[in-house]
Image: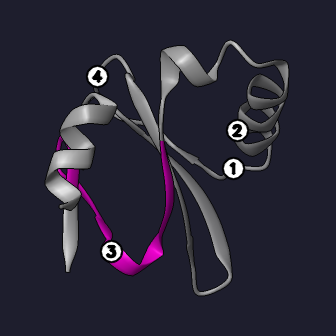
Amino acid sequence: MFYPIGGDMSVRESAVVAVFDLDNASTSKRTREFLARAEKEGQVVPCDELPKSFLLTEEFGLDRVYLSGLTYQTLEKRMK
């Protein structure tokens, strides 16, 4: 099953590791460092809108960070 995460993007249900609210999570220094490192390593998949949340995924040995214009609450509802 696939979850729509905004725009024309979807992710596989089994690949989702975690979903975070970008405003709350980015207050942590470690989260900011993680996101900066992921972007530097080419693991960030941007969205077309202002990002409000991000998803961590792992599939086929590849880690990805998907930025989403949808709120954490909207993504959570879609995944239930």
Residue at the (22%, 59%) spot, across then down: 79
* Viewer-side label of 1, 3: 3
Give the residue pinned by disc 1.
Answer: 42
Residue 36 sits in quarter: top right
Tag 1 and tag 2, C-beta contact below 8 Å: yes
Q: Is residue 12 above or below residue 70?
A: below
Q: Is residue 65 left or right of residue 19?
A: right
Q: Tag 4 or tag 3, which sits nearer the N-term?
A: 3
Helix, strand or loop at mark 3: strand
Tag 1 and tag 4, C-beta contact below 8 Å: no
Helix, strand or loop at mark 1: loop
Residue 72 sits in quarter: top left
Which of the image's four quarters has the C terminus?
A: bottom left
Q: Tag 2 or tag 4, which sits nearer the N-term?
A: 2
Q: CA distance from mark 3 to mark 2?
A: 21 Å
Q: Residue type at mark 2: give it.
A: Glu
Tell me where the magenta segment starts and ends, as one range. 4-19
Helix, strand or loop at mark 2: helix
Q: CA distance from mark 1 to mark 2?
A: 5 Å
The percent position of residue 28, horizontal first and vertical second, equals 75, 19
Residue at the (69%, 49%) spot, across then down: 42
Helix, strand or loop at mark 4: loop
The percent position of residue 11, horizontal first and vertical second, equals 32, 65
Residue at the (68%, 12%) spot, across then down: 27
- Local crowd size for mark 3, using a 10 Å CA cut-off: few (<14), some (14–19), many (≥20): few
Give the residue pinned by disc 3.
Answer: 12
